[in-house]
Image: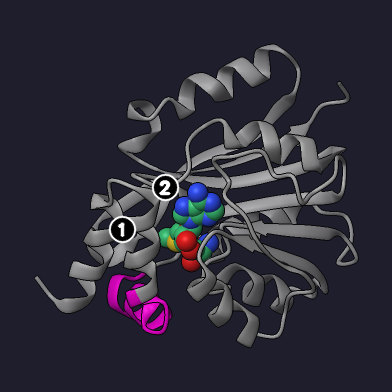
Amino acid sequence: MSGSNQLWKATYDAETQDQLNEAYKHWATEYDRDTVQGMGYVGPVTACKMLDNYLESPKSRVLDAGCGTGLVGEILARHGYGRLDAMDISKDMLEVAAQKDVYGKLIQADMNEPLKKLTDDTYDASICVGTFTYAHVGPDAFDELIRITKPGGYVCFTIRDGAYQEYGYRQRMHELEATNQWELLEMAKQDYLVKEGVTAKFCVYRVGNC
Ligand SMILES: C[S@@+](CC[C@H](N)C(=O)[O-])C[C@H]1O[C@@H](n2cnc3c(N)ncnc32)[C@H](O)[C@@H]1O
């Protein structure tokens, strides 16, 4: 197994948040090269394109949740978006994201907990790529992304195939739909890590008015 694959595997094998943060600490500076060039990571490009199809204006305020090193922010900035905030639990990943110079606020927060630093109905959209996956962020985080996104706004995210059913994402997505907290606009299985043969679900929901 190559060095970069070992670092990637360490993030999926983490048993505690501390172990996960430690894994990203060792990976932060090489993450972009290892994922994009090394593994053919196309998740950010595909998800940003999907969200861009729904947002009416580049003035939309967007939260990049689980921003990592800021790959999503860089792509959204290239699409013309200039009101971007970033959130991640890892200080080391946020430090790399800050260097991209595309974000306003950089928020350190645990998405598995209530997002106390963020008020209701703040964003026109939240986007979360690569973070609903093994050993990372669980399905309860959907509720918080809905809370901080404006009614009528969008929540766009990826879920690694495999983790989708195993981790309870599917069930929570359906429950939130059944209670009109969000409405599914699009869900597609797409390439995610092309060179690893990994696919993911790419989803866009519209936040309800309740
Ligand atoms: C695979 S990276 C994806 C980063 C970026 N969105 C991308 O597509 O490149 C997953 C990110 O989720 C973050 N993360 C893991 N657990 C988290 C949690 N509980 N709260 C917030 N962020 C978390 C990690 O620190 C890491 O930066």
Nearer to me, 17 or 129:
17
Q: In percent of the image, x 85 and y 40: which residue is there?
A: 120
Placement of the C terminus among the 4 image quadrants:
top right
Specify the segment rendered in magenta: 26-40
Q: On screen, 46 above or below 172?
A: below
Horizontal side of 16 relative to 187 (left or right) equals left
Number of the label disc, if any, that sits on residue 26: none
Number of the label disc, if any, that sits on residue 11: 1
Q: Answer whether residue 130 is visible to the viewer in this image.
A: no
Placement of the N terminus among the 4 image quadrants:
bottom left
Nearer to me, 83 or 110:
110
Q: Which residue is mark 2?
A: 136
Report how far apart the C-alphas of labels 1 and 2 lie in the structure: 8 Å
Q: Are marks 1 and 2 in contact (CB under 8 Å)?
A: yes
Is 35 part of what is drawn in magenta? Answer: yes
- Kindly identify the amino acid type of the residue bearing the numbered disc 1: Thr
Q: On screen, 172 above or below 80?
A: above
Q: Answer whether residue 31 is visible to the viewer in this image.
A: yes
Q: How many other residues sit within 10 Å of disc 2, few (<14), some (14-19) or many (≥20)? A: many
Return the disc, 1 or 2, that comes first in the chain's sequence: 1
Q: Position of residue 101 (x, y in %)?
A: 70, 85
Q: Note whether ligand 1 is within 8 Å of mark 2.
A: yes
Q: On screen, 99 above or below 113?
A: below
Nearer to me, 179 or 116:
116
